[in-house]
Image (cartoon, rainbow, N blue to C red):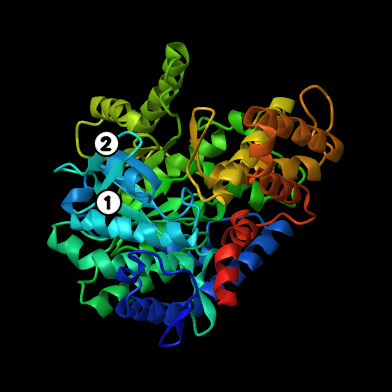
Amino acid sequence: MARSEFNTRVLGPIGAGYDSILTPEALAFVAALTRAFRPTVRALLTAREAQQAAISAGTLPVFPPETADVRTRDWTVAPLPADLQDRRVEITGPVDRKMIINALNSGASCFMADLEDSNAPTWANVIEGQINLRDAVAGTIDFYDARRDKRYAVVDDPAVLLVRPRGWHLWEKHVLVDDEPVPAGIFDFALYFFHNAKARVAQGTGPYFYLPKLQHYLEARLWNDIFVAAQEALGVPEGTIKATVLIETLPAAFQMDEILWELREHSSGLNCGRWDYIFSFIKTFEAYGDRVLPDRGQIGMTQPFMDAYTSRVIQVCHRREVHAMGGMAAQIPIKGDPAANAKAMDKVRQDKLREVQSGHDGTWVAHPGLVGLAREVFDAHMPTPNQIANKREDVDVSPTDLLELPTGVITEQGLRQNVDVGVQYLASWMAGQGCVPIYDLMEDAATAEISRTQVWQWLRYGASLDDGRTVTLELFERVLDEEQAKLRERLGAEAYDTSTFPAARALFASLSTSEVLVEFLTLPAYERLVAPTLTLQDQS
């Protein structure tokens, strides 16, 4: 049954323990922040559309002239707390119970519990994730794996916990305030902050966050306003919240100083969200037939536009006395194939070596098995807690550098990889799993976003393969049929036909061939994901 509190309606089913999260007081907090800031969220989303329209019409991104003073003037962010000084290895993953325990126990410096790209936002995943986070903060989290007859509990010195709420483009449709959905970022932040902020402060740490997919410094200003309001409402000192912003959109790369400035009392630095950054590069230049990207496997961190972006993150952060975090190593240790595993681990090692030698203060891994390797590399080359003293004054990045087109070719294998991995990930996401091991890599939503936008771009502009053929609708449909036939044979016809694969295939094909590039695949996918629970509640 739909539950109502002071014109706040909870449409999602109330499972075991949900009442302990969705308390009247917590919902009142959600409602207050929603009423105060939802209009600004809507206005900023409209501004995104205008910004994209201007770029599509030929106005390339530049450093904003109105904020030149912010970029040139000397200032620094507020000092960081002790437990965020050394962040050399951070592990990320979704908020399921076992994952949280394993990540906290992994030996990483920090754990980013992810309510965004690696979490399929079913109602159960969202609320049970909040239960799991609350229990982790309280020190009561445990998990029993009946299949392995093994109990999991958190060690005495766990990783520092950070939480990533969903981005501004997403909405939590299971909760209505004044008959309208709550911005998903506000919902995720508010519930975690309400239930855990004071406990974190009492434990000598704080409520720490990662902020995804910002496209403008005004979006950072919105987060800062929310932080100030939340701290004031709960009697938490201003500046207690610390947040790291992921620079994972092309527009944000032109506004790094400005983003740090807006969050200066609450900032804990910037992170290079490189897979989403590639996706954003494609999406930003959707109207440009002369900016077609090669196979995603060829777009490495040594491509000039990627090197420029990450070098600028380091320079800007260190000038402002805050951390510049490196990118994700998505590899998974490969069991049963020592040669393949050695090759994969060498890729990780070289990637982390490049990051630490460039001046990054820490890095990301997706699997506990990579924590030791990443730590070994950073320990060898970063004896201090961070490298903020390395100001990278040699860096001089221009707009042209950030916009340089990567070199490479488009191959049939690249097309097949996009189709295969894109559909596989989307099927798992639609089944409620947002963090998916595929071909020895831990994939999240950014994988599917790159896959379907590359296919869309190649089809839209009739890209040429390295063998001279053109990427046509006919070729795409043949590859889709063939890759799905392989998968159906591998899984078995009945297992495939009764799974989410047919729906994922249809959605991937629709997104890849649409007349207009859909901004985020998670928007139409979310409608399908939550339809059963919302329909059930509407009928009750």
- In the image, residue 306 sits, relative to residue 180, either above or below, namely above
Residue 258 in sight here: no
Q: Which residue appears at 19% of the width and 49% of the height? A: 83
Q: What is the secondary structure assignment of the residue under circle 2?
A: strand
Judging by the rendered image, the residue that carries numbered circle 2 is: 150
Image side of residue 208 versus residue 332, left or right:
left
Residue at the farthest top position? 339
- Report the Cα–Cα distance between label 1 and label 2: 24 Å
If the image is split into quadrants, where does the C terminus sit? bottom right
**Residue 284 place in picture, x, y as percent:** 64, 52
Q: What is the secondary structure assignment of the residue under circle 1?
A: strand
Quadrant of the image occupied by residue 467 = top right
In this rendered view, identify the residue nearer to me: 107 or 429: 429
Judging by the rendered image, the residue that carries numbered circle 1 is: 161
Amino acid at dot 2: Lys
Amino acid at dot 1: Leu
Image side of residue 177 versus residue 189, left or right:
right
**Residue 278 place in picture, x, y as percent:** 58, 43
In this rendered view, identify the residue nearer to me: 405 or 33: 33
Mark 1 or 2: in front is 2
